[in-house]
């Protein structure tokens, strides 16, 4: 699909550029063509006036080199001659300032008669000629001028345009291919992530549904038993329903965060107090798991945002630290002011996170250790939610880890201006 999209992009791009080049080259050619032929027509009339002056010698169909003339040097750039006829188009005289074959005069004369036009062009012996017919007393004067150089210039101009267009299209093809690949890459990545997201969500929903279905079958197979005796199966169903409810809530929350155009209303609040309250709610759980907790919170720090969402971020980071802290390990929390930011760091001892996973831990459904995740629950959405919330607060969240030692999550939020 993406290959076809890239090819369509390339074809459309090359087509548009080809049309633009064709229009540009055609415009240049037409302007040049008109300029050259305006010069040719002007020179034809000058030469015609010159040949119609009295005192010009007739060559009588024979080449001559001993003619006397006082033509302007600008008119000597191309070969020219003139044929005078009577009213019945019979040749009376031929006047030329150049040494040319007599057959050329006759063939040129025949070419003019065959075209039967007042002005035009023709080709003889690989030479291009332009002519103009003007009435004179008792007949007509036909003036010819050699335009081979001008015609060659126009022909070379066309070939130059074709070569330039071909070279440009080849260069543009490779440039367009490069940018097409770069343009499609994020689209492809987003599409792949969306596919993976749907696959992961389906997989996560499939497991509790299977458990619920199995337990319902057990209940149906013992439909005469009391509810008290079958309460175990009902508790299993309720537990899985609660897991599905949480998963559905998290998915809807992420979808709303991603696609909602509604701007959230932020207010200033004491983040030091909010983080301390979140920590206090987790103290009992940490104590039960024999994990020591140390925290250092700089007082009276304020940020502009949503207090409940920031509290949710803290709870996600604490829950994540609790899951991955080694037995009798420690969790250290720090909240400090640094430059124009407030930095929250949550460090837990444990196995740490390898470099290959550290950049992906904020991806949805991504889990570094699926066996431990199954043990402690969760779907791999917590850190993704935390990242979305922090980014909505114009902040940054990232992690650093030392294998077999510790892992630290950092949240940087901009301070309010009154601090």
Image (cartoon, rainbow, N blue to C red):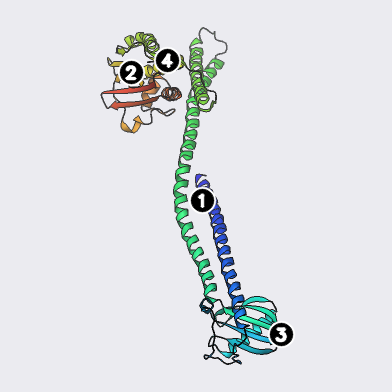
Q: Quadrant of residue 372?
A: top left
Q: CA distance from mark 4 to mark 2?
A: 18 Å
Residue holding disc 2? 337
Q: Residue at x 52, y 48 (%)?
A: 9
Name above or below for residue 358 compared with residue 282: below
Residue positioned most to the left: 405
* Element under disc 4: helix
Question: How many residues crowd around disc 2 within 10 Å: few (fewer than 14), some, or many (20 or more)?
Answer: some
Q: Position of residue 300 (x, y in %)?
A: 36, 11
* Residue 139 image label: 3
N-terminal label among 4 and 2: 4
Name above or below for residue 186 compared with residue 95: above
N-terminal label among 1 and 4: 1
Number of the front mark, 1 or 3: 3
Question: How many residues crowd around disc 4 within 10 Å: few (fewer than 14), some, or many (20 or more)?
Answer: some
Question: How many residues crowd around disc 1 within 10 Å: few (fewer than 14), some, or many (20 or more)?
Answer: many
Q: CA distance from mark 2 to mark 3?
A: 105 Å
Please state if 227 lies on the left or on the right of 332 as rendered: right
Q: Nearer the viewer, residue 137 or 201?
A: 137
Q: Nearer the viewer, residue 25 or 112?
A: 112
Q: Quadrant of residue 114?
A: bottom right
N-terminal label among 1 and 3: 1
Q: Residue at x 54, y 91 (%)?
A: 64
Q: CA distance from mark 1 to mark 3?
A: 63 Å
Q: CA distance from mark 1 to mark 4?
A: 49 Å
| Callout 4–callout 2 Cβ contact below 8 Å | no
Number of the front mark, 4 or 2: 2
* Residue 311 image label: 4
Residue holding disc 1? 10
């Amino acid at each position: 699909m993406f290959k076809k999209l890239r090819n369509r992009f390339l074809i459309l791009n090359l087509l548009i550029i080809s049309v633009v080049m064709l229009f540009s080259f055609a415009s240049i050619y037409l302007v040049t063509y008109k300029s050259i032929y305006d010069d040719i027509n002007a020179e034809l009339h000058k030469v015609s006036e010159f040949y119609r002056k009295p005192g010009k010698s007739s060559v009588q169909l024979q080449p001559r080199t001993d003619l006397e003339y006082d033509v302007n040097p600008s008119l000597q750039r191309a070969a020219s001659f003139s044929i005078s006829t009577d009213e019945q188009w019979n040749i009376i005289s031929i006047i030329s300032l150049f040494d040319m074959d007599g057959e050329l005069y006759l063939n040129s004369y025949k070419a003019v008669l065959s075209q039967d036009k007042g002005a035009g062009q023709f080709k003889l012996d690989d030479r291009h000629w332009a002519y103009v017919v003007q009435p004179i007393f008792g007949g007509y004067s036909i003036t010819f001028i050699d335009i081979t150089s001008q015609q060659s210039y126009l022909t070379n101009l066309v070939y130059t345009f074709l070569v330039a267009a071909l070279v440009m299209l080849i260069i543009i093809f490779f440039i367009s291919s490069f940018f097409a690949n770069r343009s499609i890459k994020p689209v492809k990545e987003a599409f792949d992530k969306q596919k993976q997201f749907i696959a992961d969500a389906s997989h996560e929903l499939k497991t509790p549904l299977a458990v619920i279905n199995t337990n319902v079958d057990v209940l149906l197979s013992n439909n005469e038993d009391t509810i008290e005796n079958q309460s175990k199966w009902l508790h299993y169903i309720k537990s899985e329903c609660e897991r599905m409810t949480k998963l559905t809530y998290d998915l809807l929350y992420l979808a709303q965060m991603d696609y909602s155009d509604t701007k959230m209303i932020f207010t200033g609040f004491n983040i030091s107090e909010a983080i301390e309250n979140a920590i206090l709610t987790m103290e009992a759980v940490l104590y039960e798991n024999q994990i020591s907790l140390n925290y250092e919170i700089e007082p009276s720090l304020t940020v502009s945002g949503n207090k409940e969402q920031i509290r949710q971020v803290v709870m996600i980071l604490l829950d994540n630290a609790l899951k991955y802290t080694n037995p009798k390990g420690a969790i250290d929390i720090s909240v400090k002011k640094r430059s124009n930011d407030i930095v929250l760091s949550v460090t837990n001892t444990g196995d740490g996170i390898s470099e290959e996973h550290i950049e992906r831990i904020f991806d949805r459904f991504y889990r570094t250790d699926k066996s431990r995740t199954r043990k402690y629950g969760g779907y791999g959405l917590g850190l993704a939610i935390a990242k979305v919330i922090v980014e909505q607060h114009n902040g940054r969240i990232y992690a650093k880890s030392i294998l077999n030692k510790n892992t630290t999550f950092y949240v940087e939020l901009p301070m309010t201006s009154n601090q």
